[in-house]
Amino acid sequence: MADAPDKPVYLLTGSDRPKIDTALGRLRGHFVPEATDVVSALETSAEAAVALCNAGSLFGDARLVVVEDVDGRRDSDGRRKGGWKAADADALSTYLASPAPATVIALVGEDVKKTTALWKNCAKAGSVLEFAVAKKAIQGWIAEQFAKRDVRAEPEACALLLQLVGEDLHALSQEVDKLSTWAAGEPIGEREVEMLCAASAEVPIFALTDAWAARDSARALEASETIFERESKTRRDTAARLAGALGSHLSRLRSVKRLAGEGVRSKEAAGKLKMNPFYVQKLYGQAEAFSQEELRDATVRFAELDGALKGKSKLAPDLEVQRALVDLTHRPGTSPRTL
């Protein structure tokens, strides 16, 4: 961004919210706070935002209007809702044909597409600033954030942090700040991340799969109950989601078990499976704990769970999931405890 804003409109978009916040902070630094309005497109239409631009300011000529969430906001299902529509893009386009002098409107969105009228209007009349990090590059981004703070973080620590916090770069940046302050120049490893970072990712499924691999029924049940309590959805919906996630994990275990049997090393398998090498290495370790027969039995058990969740059982769905976990975590040669 230029030293002083010289465009009537700026569009700031992308997954790298920390960079967006930095750019937005620089932009706001050119305006007195009293001449700045911050609204959300979830409640404010483009017409209302344009009215703010045309209202002028009692604190000088310069005025800034910031509109957040122009492309909506994700709900608990990950679907984007709200935000400006075609009529709002038209209203903005009309305004930009003759914008208010010394007034800047800054639009902020997470995933505004280049093909949208909103992007095109902003690119034509002003400036588009895109700050994005590809999902496959997030772990590297985490390592870079530690390096910027002069802290050395082990790759395993960065991978674990991503698992715990999820892909929200703003939340990840805050955790990096916290860990860097605590480290005081010392290296950051998995132990430090596990000790200092609370799991905030939508579903900490790794806690469940780790307990499954360790054949720790008590820990698996505790992890599942934590997930049921943390989820905003009903326990029925969460049960279906957990069953799907565990079934996917089983498929990956069977894949790496087969590859390991063919003599394929974990790093090579990561390339074949297009997965994070650290994660695949972990899968290799977990797969070693199970025989091929056990994995086949687990497949049958998941089929039974699927039927139960689709109406073949009168038991509560969350109880069916936990019964399956008890069966999956029992050791060979022993009888699984029943719930």
Image: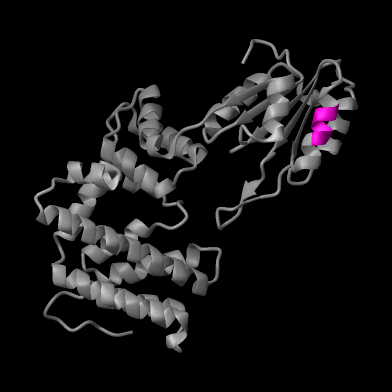
Q: Is residue 285 visible?
A: no
The range drawn in magenta is 90-94
Q: Position of residue 329 (x, y in %)?
A: 24, 72
Number of marks: 0
- Residue at horizontal 23%, vertical 54%? 283
Q: Position of residue 258 (x, y in %)?
A: 16, 58
In the foreground, 262 or 338: 262
| Residue 93 included in the magenta stretch of the image | yes
In the foreground, 139 or 60: 139
Q: Is residue 118 above or below residue 336?
A: above
Q: Position of residue 80 (x, y in %)?
A: 62, 49
Q: Quadrant of the N terminus?
A: top right
In the foreground, 55 or 191: 55
Q: Position of residue 295 (x, y in %)?
A: 20, 69
Q: Is residue 163 above or below residue 293?
A: above
Q: Return the residue found at the far front.
A: 115
The reply, left or right, for residue 325 in relation to residue 83 is left
Q: Quadrant of the C terminus?
A: bottom left
| Residue 172 included in the magenta stretch of the image | no
Place residue 113 in its image quadrant. Answer: top right
Q: Is residue 234 visible?
A: yes
Place residue 147 in its image quadrant. Answer: top left
- Residue at horizontal 36%, vertical 78%? 305
Secondary structure mostly seen in the magenta stretch: helix
The reply, left or right, for residue 157 in relation to residue 235 is left
Q: Is residue 232 above or below residue 16?
A: below
